[in-house]
Image (cartoon, rainbow, N blue to C red):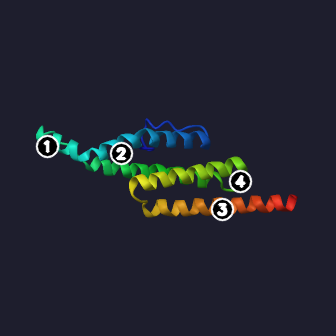
Amino acid sequence: MDIQSATWGVKSNVKEELTHIMDTFTTVRPQVDAQMRDKDDYKRKFDKEKVPFDWTLVARIHQGAVGLAKYAMTMMLTSIQGVDPHPDLLSLMEQALRFAFKCHQFAGGFDPESTQAFVSLSTSLQSMQDAQYESRSHDA
């Protein structure tokens, strides 16, 4: 879940990159959730067999999810600068916000930068929706 990794494979447009980000999270989340549900059992088994396991890895995965959310929101904020509201763009913004909220729930919260990105993207979406509504009411 590291967007800085050489293996990340950035996509050619915002929609594909957002899908790639969401797919990555969707692949990892159930595995981590299953590990956390059975953490006590695994811990007992690992301790019994004297197998070391660093449970802080889970915290780093949670931080990675926050990083993915921040990346998705920042990508959207950058891509909407100077762009007129369009239903496809508004849909992508909504997807990014829903994804960010899922990451927030998974990780147990956001860092301050992610919180600011969430507020900024949410505010931008609302402004664009309002502008689109205004445009429609003037056309009617």
How many neighbours does mark 3 have within 10 angstroms: few (below 14), some (14-19), or many (20 or more)?
A: few
Above or below residue 134? Residue 41 is: above
Residue 79 in percent (x, y) is at 63, 51
Give whichever of discs 1 and 4 has the lower sequence position.
1
Pick the front one: 98 or 131: 98
Is there CB contact under 8 Å for labels 1 and 4?
Answer: no
Q: Which disc, if any, is residue 102?
A: none
Q: Which disc, if any, is residue 33?
A: 2
Spatial separation of the CA atoms under disc 4 and disc 2: 38 Å
Give whichever of discs 3 and 4 has the lower sequence position.
4
Disc 2 marks a residue whose amino acid type is Asp
Give whichever of discs 4 and 2 has the lower sequence position.
2
How many neighbours does mark 2 have within 10 angstroms: few (below 14), some (14-19), or many (20 or more)?
A: few
Spatial separation of the CA atoms under disc 2 and disc 3: 33 Å
Above or below residue 19? Residue 103 is: below
Give whichever of discs 3 and 1 has the lower sequence position.
1
Q: Secondary structure at mark 1?
A: helix
Is there CB contact under 8 Å for labels 2 and 3?
Answer: no
Disc 3 marks a residue whose amino acid type is Gln
> In this image, 41 relative to 121: left or right?
left
Q: Which disc, if any, is residue 126?
A: 3
Q: Please identify the quadrant where the C terminus is shown.
A: bottom right
Looking at the rendering, which quadrant does residue 53 occupy?
A: top left
Spatial separation of the CA atoms under disc 3 and disc 1: 51 Å
Kindly report which numbered mark, 4 or 2, lies closer to the viewer in this rendering: 2
Kindly report which numbered mark, 1 or 4, lies closer to the viewer in this rendering: 1
Residue tagged 1: 47
Disc 4 marks a residue whose amino acid type is Val
